[in-house]
Amino acid sequence: MFVSRTTQRRPGVAGKAVQWTLVLACLAAAAAAAAAPVVDLDRAVAEAMAYQSGRNVEPLRQLEAAVREAVANRSRRSAVESALVRLLAPQATFEARRFACTQLAILGSDGALNALGEMLKEPETAGIACLALASNPSAKVTDLLLKSLETAPPAAREQIVVTLGDRRAPAAVKALVPLTRDSQPALREAAIVALGKIASAPALEALAELRRSGEASVARVAVQASLAAADAAARARNARAAAAIYEELLAGTQPVYVRRAALEGLLRLDADGGQQRALAVMRGADAALKPSAIYHVRNMSGRGVSALFAAELPRLATVEQVLLLDSLAARKDADALQALKDATQAPAAAVRQAAVKALAQVGDASAVPVLVQALVSYTTAAEQQTVEMALASLPGGAQVDEALVQALQTSPPAALPGLMNAAGRRGVKAAVPVMLNAAASENLAIARAAFRALGRVATPADLPGLVEQLTRVRAGAAREDAETTVIKMLEREPNPARRVAVVREALQKTGAAAVESRISLLRLLPACGSAEALAVLQAERRQEHAALRDAALRALAEWPDAAAVDVLLEEARQASQNTERVLALRGAARLLGQGGGTPAQAAGRFEKAMALARSDAEKKLIISAMSGLQHEQALQLLEPLLDNPAVRAEAEQAALRLAPRLAGAWPEAARRLLGKLSASPTSGKAAKELLDTLEKAGGYLLGWQVAGPFTAEGKDGQALFDHVFPPEQNPAPVSVTWQMAAVGTLKERPWQVDLAGLFPGDHRVAYARVWVYSETAQPARLELGADDGLKAWFNGQVVLSANRGGDVKPGEFKADLALKPGWNAILLKITQWTSGWGFCARLVKPDGAPLSPLRLSPYPPETP
């Protein structure tokens, strides 16, 4: 409950703070245990004396516990109050004294008055003293405040006045009245506001005089205070006094907001709930008051109120009708609902729109026919869209859904597009059969709306019916919507075999003569995404009809993964027409970057594609896909392209993207390419820097593939060290994604692989792997450095483990190895705690001398 904010001295702060403090205290007291330990009050007070914000709050918490106990146990109140009073001593910090005041606001009595009275004399402490006094039940508090008011410094008088108002002390009126004409505006306003809170007869009389004083600033505050006083009088059932004030403030000379507040007060006082007064205002000429009268309609009680005021709608201006519809909607009774329905056919568009929007909030199934009629009669797209949204959000659940299905079956054609849009947004699955029938309509608007709605509510179980309707489309322009909807359903179907089976069955039923329908079915096959679907398209490439062959090729070019890349390259090679060759080559280029097969196979595909590229534009297309090729052959393919002025710029950019990732594994090919680039005026500087990095990093292993980041909920970097992630499983799942780690990203550390740049964040894990080829069996030493934790496997066996934090230090960790003839696997696990993240590694002889040149592969030996 302790809060360390400084009390601000502004009108009302004491009362509001005390209210919240009391609420919290009462809740805490109700939950206090009867056997709660007794707090050592003397010790707690002594320690709390020196409290400053941000320091140990335990003494304050102990005193709070004592206060909670005292609220529940009256025998403890005196002792706890005395302890808090001691905490008010001048030698205590301001924070400590402020805390004591917040607690005294809960259980303070006469025993605290002397100390609080002393605090009222000081501007720095008067505000927090008033915080404690505002809710103190002692009858002596008002006397203390009035006495202090006479001698308090100017800065404290305002807060004392505010507190007198918060206590609603009638005895203070005599002292407050002179202050309403004080030269200090803040004190003057505080006194006027306090009179409004007190609201006794003398206070009301004083406020009346102030309202008529002629001084604009005083009269303005007096009017606001009078409204508060009238509200207080009304709550106290002093209707006569409240009404007198409201009537006076209703005068046309008052500001609009005052007149509206006064009217609302009178409406609340009226015996009939304000019905007749509201009617009079609505029928009168005072436009400023009509919004308040209309708003009050929503709160009126009694039978027939909604019908009574609904009858006024035609007499009101358009904007007032809109306001009244909003009030009727808030009433939610049968008469109000009928009025909203009737208003959907009002002459003014704004009124119709308001009625429809209100029905969307409070309507039920009975509103569906009304809104259907609106769909038919409304002529603008904006109004029809409003009706659709209303139907989609109409309350009523299953009953409204049933009404919509019924409306779809019986409504005129003009309403069907909007109804289907609404049912689709609403997710009415029971409407699927009706929508499927409508999809075959010759009416374009109906057919398109049906397919779009089916895209929202249909499920994979509806695929056969959807595909059948696709083949029966009669409104030709709706075919695209039909295809889009079926593709959505195919993508939602998790079983690839079922996806292609549905399409194949439809193809078997659809003869070659039904060209348009068959073309639509072929366009679905990329969404099936299986080898069987791919085979279907290849078979369709042998059709006699040229349009079908073209559609099959275009579907192949849209294939979602690299499974079609070899088919497309072969299509491009065999193409008899340049259009077909270009289409197939572009489709292949899009898929080349997705990989597929071994790295060597991917490189071979790029070589084929480049050989098939006839124009510079086509070569640029192939070059743009090369960034996904992580193989030495990418460097070899790019090298001759640097001599072609038409594609040199694209080749240079691709080379600069690829070289940092491939140079570690294939340094010689990278050096050749970078050497050629170094003469370029645009790329030469970057090429030279990378060459320089490779030279400085001599001897270190740089051709790593990395995977990550891996995390586990609730585990930090240190705890992740022993968590087994997929890359260290034996065998590792093929689903793990590996990528080449770039070299030269840290110029000052050319030997380090930077993981932080690849996988930003803390408390995570990355893995790195490489294969080293040895001509013979020979001993070696693996020297490693890592930030942070490090575990190393050699040929599947753990050879090093260090779960610690720290920077990368070359050679900090060493492991003796026995290289076997052929390929040897190294796998590293590097954990990240915070800050930097990376590693370095090299292989040397056991005495530290360099090993003979090593051949590296970032790929397993079976995929060289």
Image: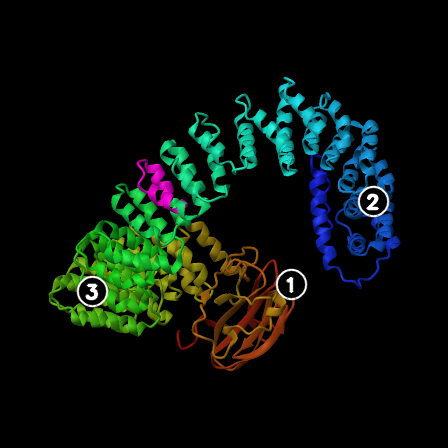
Chain-order first, disc 2 or disc 3: 2
The residue that appears at 60% across and 71% down in the rendered structure is: 721
The front one of 424 and 351 is 351
Secondary structure state at the residue bearing disc 1: loop
The residue that appears at 39% across and 39% down in the rendered structure is: 310
Determine which quarter of the picture holds residue 791.
bottom right
With respect to residue 245, does 438 lie above or below? below
Q: Nearer the viewer, mark 2 or mark 3?
A: 2
Q: Gap between marks 2 and 3, in whole Å?
A: 92 Å
Chain-order first, disc 1 or disc 3: 3
Q: Gap between marks 2 and 1, in whole Å?
A: 61 Å
Residue beneath disc 2: 109
Residue 552, disc? 3
Name the magenta segment's main secondary structure.
helix
- Give the total number of marks visible in the rendering: 3
Q: Is residue 282 left or right of residue 767?
A: left
